[in-house]
Image: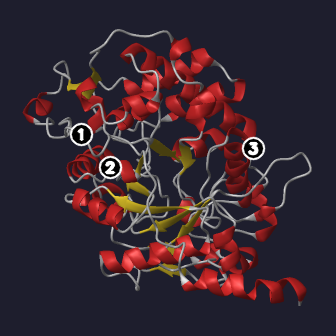
Amino acid sequence: LTVGGVYQWKRKGEYHLFNPQTIHLLQHATKTNDVATFKKYSKAVNDQEEKAVTLRSLFRFRHNRPPVSIDEVEPAENIYKRFATGAMSFGSISWEAHTTLAIAMNRIGAKSNTGEGGEDEKRYELLPNGDSMRSAIKQVASARFGVTSYYLTESDELQIKMAQGAKPGEGGQLPGHKVDDWIGKTRHSTPGVGLISPPPHHDIYSIEDLAQLIFDLKNSNRKARINVKLVSKAGVGTIAAGVAKAKADVILISGHDGGTGASPISSIRHAGLPWELGLAESHQTLVKNKLRSRVVLQADGQMKTARDIAVATLLGAEEWGVATAALIVEGCIMMRKCHMNTCPVGVATQDPELRKRFTGDADHVVNFFKLITQELREIMAGLGFRTINEMVGQSDYLEVRDDVKHWKYKNLDLTPILYKEPASLYTGLFNSEQQDHGIDNILDWKLIKAAQPALDTQ
C-alpha cells in the first residue's frame, strides 16, 4: 500500500530538491565542516538538467569579464552580515531550534529573525560564554503577537510582514495545542487557544497607512532599520516603489517556496510565485523610478546553495534570507509534521519529550554559512566581481540555458527577468543612501528633552 499524501518525498513521487540524499550531504558537510562534501551537496541541488525545479535552474552564468583571483574578492566577514534567517516564530519551532539559530547568526555578525511570535526577555542577556540569544530582526505582523515597547527597542531591524511567500494573502495560524504557558506568555495570549493572524493589517489599507507605521516604528527605535516584507507577485514592482516612497529602509521579496510548515496543503502547492519573478520586477521598477539607491533589496525562499545566492544578487538582491536550509543543518529531516506538534527531531514541536531529541548545534549553522559564503566568493571570482555591490543587478551576467533537455522549457520566454534597466545619473543599482525619516524635529523628542531634568532627578 502507498503511504498516501501529496507533498512528502517519495522514491517514485514528485521530485524534491531537499531529498534524503541532499539532506544527508548537507548535514554531514556542516557537522564535519567538510568542503568536499558541501560541494557534492551543491552539485546535487544545482544539477537540474533532467528535472528543472526552479526558474533559476534555467539560467547559466555569462562570463563577460576575465576572472579575478579569489584573494581579490571581499572577505567572508563582509558577506556574512548580508545573511538573515527567515521569519520563524518561537511557537512554530522549538525554543532550542530558535535560540540555536540566533546564537549562530550573532557569532558571525548576521541577523536572525523572531518571526511574529514575540521574544522572551531573558534572551536579551548574554550567556556565560558570551553568546547572545537575541534576534536582531523583530517582526511586526498583522496580529502584533508579543509586540511591546521593550521588544521594539531591543532590535537592530523591525520587519513589517505584509504577507508570507508560501501563502500570500491568507494570514496565519498557530494551533492551540502548540500554545503552551510559555508561548502564551511570550505572545501575551491565552495558553491552549489557537492564534490567528489576519491576512491584512487592520491599520494598513494604503501606502500612506504603511508610511505611518514605518514612521511610528522608526520613532520607537531610531537605530533600527525598517524592513517591509512583500511577496513575489505580478505587479509587486509597483508596490515596492510605493514602499520605498513610504521610507522603508529594506524591502524583502519572499518567494512561493518558503518553507512554512503549517500552511494548508493547497497553499503550499498552488499559491505564490518564485522570487526570481518578483525580485527582478522590483529591482527594475525601483531603478526606473530612481528609488533603488534608497533601499536595500532582500530576497528569500528556499535559498539552498551559493549559486542561488549569486543568481539573486545578479537579479538585484544585496541581502538574502535562508531558513529551511538552516533548519536542516540543525537536524530537520523534512517529516512535514510541523503543524501536528509531533516533529521527531525536536525542531518544530513544543512537546517536552520530543524537544529532548534536538541535536542541533550553533557551530554547525556557523559552518553552513561559512561554506556557502566561500562557495559564493569562488563564483564571484569566476565572474570577475570583487565585491557584492559590484555584482548587484548585473543581470546581463545571466543567460537562458539552451541545453535543458525537457521539451516544455523550449517555449518559455525568460528574457524579461534578465532585462537590465539602465541606471541613471541620480541612482545606482544598489543601496547607497539613507532614507530621510523626518524624525529629528518631532514633538516627542522636544518633550523628552524638556522633561529630562525631572526624569534624571525624580
Colour scheme in the image? secondary structure
Q: Residue 423 carries which label?
A: 1
Does residue 365 appear left or right of residue 14 in this picture? right
Does residue 94 appear left or right of residue 408 in this picture? right
**Amino acid at pointer 2:** Arg
Give neighbour class at mark 2: few <14, some 14-19, many 20+ (Cα, 10 Å).
many
Pointer 1 or 3: first along the chain: 3
Residue pointed to by mark 3: 359
- Which residue is more in the foreground, 56 or 262? 56
Residue pointed to by mark 2: 292
Task: Name the element at disc 3.
Answer: loop
Q: Disc 2 to disc 1, how far (Cα)?
A: 9 Å
- Which residue is more in the foreground, 433 or 319? 433
**Amino acid at pointer 1:** Ala
Give neighbour class at mark 3: few <14, some 14-19, many 20+ (Cα, 10 Å).
some
Residue found at x 81% / y 47%: 131
Residue found at x 86% / y 47%: 130
Residue found at x 55% / y 58%: 337
Q: Disc 3 to disc 2, how far (Cα)?
A: 42 Å
**Amino acid at pointer 3:** Thr
Pointer 2 or 1: first along the chain: 2
- Which residue is more in the foreground, 37 or 446? 446
Quarter location, residue 453: bottom right
Q: Where is residue 177 in the image (x, y as percent from the top left)?
A: 63, 76
